[in-house]
Amino acid sequence: MNVRTVYSLYPNFVSRAQRMARLIFDTSGRITRARYWLFIGSAVPTTVLLREAYVAAAAWREDTDNFVFDLMVRLLQSFVATFVVVIVIGGAAMTVKRLHDREKSGSWLAHFVVGPALLFWLGQVFLDAHLEAVHSLPYVLQFVALFVFVWGFVELCCRRGTAGDNHFGTDPLQPKIRLPDALRRSAAR
């Protein structure tokens, strides 16, 4: 079976794949809450399942000395790592488009994702260093991280986008009216 045969069986495959890649990886434009939830609802469980499969296979690999099984686990590890990188990049692009729908620039990604992660990590470093006996700074940092994360969740996942067009693009919920050819030609005159 050659490439032409496959393409003749699936003529729209390339255009659909390009549309899907543009939807996931392009940062221009706007997306609705539903598309954002669909991405999150499919990416997170898939990532968790792949990670659990890898952990189980790696634990089983320690009990065996089979070269083929070791190679399969390493291939699974590289696949999971590649998948996670693709999901992180796609998630960042989808979040930027969702921020655009809320009429915010992509730099808010740092406020809603990177900032809370760094604050939580810094609080955890202080907790691991047993500094909680001295003062409550680790708990304050983690509380602030949780607050900002919840704020970002509400802003991105719960609130409606800007009604109508904004400077990031057209409203994705606005119906796209397709005029018949005769009306389109008369409107162009």
Image (cartoon, rainbow, N blue to C red):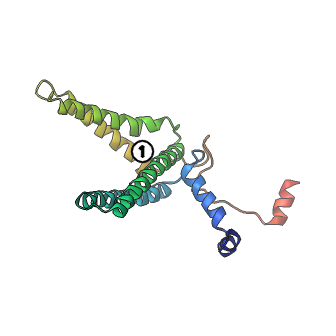
Looking at this view, is 24 or 33 the one in front?
Answer: 24
- Determine whether, in the image, residue 160 is placed left or right of residue 189: left
Q: Amino acid at mark 1?
A: Glu
| Of 106 and 84, the residue lying toward us | 84
Residue extending furthest toward the right: 189
At which x and y percent is residue 129?
Answer: 17, 29
Q: Position of residue 66 (x, y in %)?
A: 31, 63
Q: Is residue 1 left or right of residue 156?
A: right
Quadrant of the image occupied by residue 50: bottom left
At x 71%, y 70%, the residue is: 4
Residue 145 seen in render: yes
Relative height, residue 46 to residue 109 (above, below):
below
Q: Nearer the viewer, residue 168 or 20?
A: 20
> Looking at the picture, how far across and down is residue 136, in whole percent?
17, 28
Nearer to us in this view, 140 or 169:
140
Residue identified by numbered label 1: 155
Work out which quarter of the rendered image holds the N terminus and state it.
bottom right
Residue extending farthest to the left is: 133
Q: Quadrant of the C terminus?
A: bottom right
Q: Circle 1 — which element?
A: helix
Q: Could you tell me how many numbered marks the image carries?
A: 1
Location of residue 169 in the rendering, given as x and y in whole percent from the top left corner: 62, 46
Looking at the picture, does residue 26 appear above or below residue 45?
above
**Residue 110 in the figure: left or right of residue 3:** left
Residue 45 visible? The answer is no
Instruction: Tell whether 88 sits left or right of 30.
Output: left
User: Which corner quadrant of the image does residue 54 belong to?
Assistant: bottom left
Tag 1: Cα neighbours inside 10 Å, few (<14), some, or many (≥20)? some
